[in-house]
């Protein structure tokens, strides 16, 4: 990676310190991205505890999921515009996005009633939505010939946060705080202040984006206007279907694991983390591979694996066969059903998160000059629209079927067709 960073470091001018180095630049944005997701992903572990505390039904869980996804998704309509307009202040936007995401999550923990809890958690998602357009725009303009890899490192940061966050939070709640999730939100805010200051200091010393003479003046409607290009329709579809499956699972799978499979907070956090864990390592390789052979093959492979993996989990859940065995050389008993679910989630996790980075890199390949933020805004608007719709539909299906197992069938049915569609979908920008 060092040779690439050295060659791309001259893409923008800036002070000659380690803060200006390409490796530092990517590490700061990627690690910051991971920490932001760590704070936001903790809610998935809190959810079964909130459901138990307030005695919520599947309808209540659905409403919570819709509010949270809408709160984090709708702002992407204008966040891209704000990012393009304030391109000289990207080094401010990122730390503030992280700080307010942590602040609102902390405030949710001191609310005694369920709906203010959800309102502040949703505001945390809103604050977090201000991260992606400037972050991905910064990486794309700094590393124009290696954007697939650079964006993949950024995505691996988020994958690490999504994977390690629930795992660590679940461990702390189960073994240290006796499932007192409110105390956790208070304790976690103090490190967030230090992280915000460090992030700003590192980014303030990095090179800044230079004005582009060919850049278009951004307009509020640019994210939607980009849909006149068929490539963005295709990529919006990819993000919509992936997020439909991913965030639908995030919304309901923790309750399924806790109530149907009797897992504790650590078990829930571990399995939620599996949705992204292996993608942390695989993501940069996935991005590098897409830079070398093109974006189409990685996208097709990811959608096929995601759909197939969800079908496997659904089929195992429907068998109602509980086989136990003991691990070799130990006295640890394992349910075969649990093992299959664990392995399937890990396999899905190779692609579920990292595939989004390849889709985003494809979008940035086709981005008109000066509209990088709007391009990212469209991608995350479509992604989080899929997440909101997924939560709504999965909640309805869970209520109709009376079981949370149905979400895996639905998620697979939505994701799998994308593998065939993207064999032929346009991935280049042509004239509208």
Image (tube, rainbow, N blue to C red):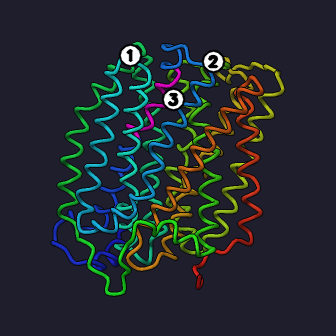
Q: How far is mark 3 from mark 2, CA to CA?
A: 14 Å
Work out whether mark 1 precedes mark 3 in sequence or the reverse, and give the earlier one.
1
- Give the labeled residue for mark 3: 269
Whether label 1 touches label 3, CB < 8 Å: no
Whether label 1 touches label 2, CB < 8 Å: no
The residue positioned 22% from the left and 66% from the top of the image is 206
In terms of depth relative to the viewer, which is nearer, 24 or 76?
76
What mark, if any, has residue 222 been given in the picture?
Answer: none
What mark, if any, has residue 180 been given in the picture?
Answer: 1
Crowdedness near tag 3: few (<14), some (14–19) or many (≥20) residues, C-alpha within 10 Å:
many
The correct choice, above or below, for 395 with respect to 127 in the image is above
SS at circle 3: helix
Residue 168, located in which quarter of the rendered image?
top left
The residue positioned 79% from the left and 19% from the top of the image is 322
The residue positioned 56% from the left and 75% from the top of the image is 292
The correct choice, above or below, for 359 with respect to 161 in the image is below
Q: Which of marks 3 and 2 is in front?
A: 2
Q: Where is residue 363 in the image (x, y as percent from the top left)?
A: 52, 69
In terms of depth relative to the viewer, which is nearer, 112 or 250?
112
> Which quadrant holds the C terminus?
bottom right
The residue positioned 48% from the left and 75% from the top of the image is 367
Residue 119, located in which quarter of the rendered image?
top left
The stretch in magenta equals 38-48
In terms of depth relative to the viewer, which is nearer, 357 or 149?
357
Q: Position of residue 213 (x, y in %)?
A: 31, 87
Q: How far is mark 1 from mark 2, CA to CA?
A: 19 Å
- Give the labeled residue for mark 2: 259
In terms of depth relative to the viewer, which is nearer, 267 or 105?
105
């Amino acid at each position: 990676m060092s040779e690439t960073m050295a060659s791309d470091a001259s893409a923008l001018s800036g002070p000659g310190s380690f803060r200006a180095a390409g490796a530092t630049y990517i590490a700061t944005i990627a690690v910051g991205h991971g920490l932001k997701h760590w704070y936001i992903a903790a809610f998935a572990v809190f959810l079964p505890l909130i459901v138990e505390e307030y005695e919520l039904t599947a309808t209540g869980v659905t409403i919570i999921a819709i509010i949270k996804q809408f709160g984090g998704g709708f702002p992407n309509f204008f966040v891209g515009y704000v990012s393009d307009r304030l391109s000289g202040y990207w080094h401010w936007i990122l730390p503030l996005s992280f700080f307010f995401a942590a602040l609102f999550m902390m405030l949710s923990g001191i609310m005694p009633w369920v709906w203010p809890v959800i309102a502040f958690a949703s505001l945390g998602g809103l604050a977090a939505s201000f991260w992606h357009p400037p972050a991905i725009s910064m990486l794309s303009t700094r590393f124009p010939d290696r954007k697939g890899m650079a964006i993949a490192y950024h995505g691996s940061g988020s994958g690490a946060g999504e994977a390690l966050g629930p795992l660590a939070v679940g461990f702390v709640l189960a073994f240290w705080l006796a499932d007192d999730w409110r105390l956790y939100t208070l304790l976690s805010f103090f490190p967030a202040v230090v992280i915000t200051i460090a992030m700003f200091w590192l980014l303030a010393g990095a090179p800044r984006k230079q004005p582009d003479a060919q850049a278009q003046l951004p307009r509020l409607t640019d994210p939607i206007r980009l849909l006149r290009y068929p490539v963005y329709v295709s990529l919006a579809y990819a993000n919509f279907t992936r997020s439909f499956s991913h965030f639908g699972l995030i919304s309901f799978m923790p309750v399924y694991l806790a109530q149907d499979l009797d897992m504790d907070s650590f078990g829930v956090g571990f399995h939620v983390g599996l949705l992204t864990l292996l993608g942390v390592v695989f993501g940069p390789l996935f991005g590098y591979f897409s830079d070398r052979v093109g974006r189409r093959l990685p996208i097709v492979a990811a959608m096929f694996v995601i759909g197939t993996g969800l079908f496997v989990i659904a089929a195992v859940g429907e068998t109602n066969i509980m086989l136990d065995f003991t691990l070799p050389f130990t006295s640890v008993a394992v349910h075969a059903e649990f093992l299959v679910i664990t392995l399937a989630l890990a396999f899905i996790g190779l692609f579920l998160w990292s595939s989004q980075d390849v889709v985003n890199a494809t979008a940035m390949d086709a981005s008109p000059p000066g509209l990088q933020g709007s391009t990212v805004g469209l991608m995350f608007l479509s992604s989080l629209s899929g997440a909101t719709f997924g939560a709504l539909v999965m909640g309805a299906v869970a209520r109709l079927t009376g079981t949370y197992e149905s979400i895996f069938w639905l998620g697979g049915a939505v994701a799998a067709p994308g593998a065939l569609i993207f064999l032929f979908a346009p991935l280049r920008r042509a004239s509208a």
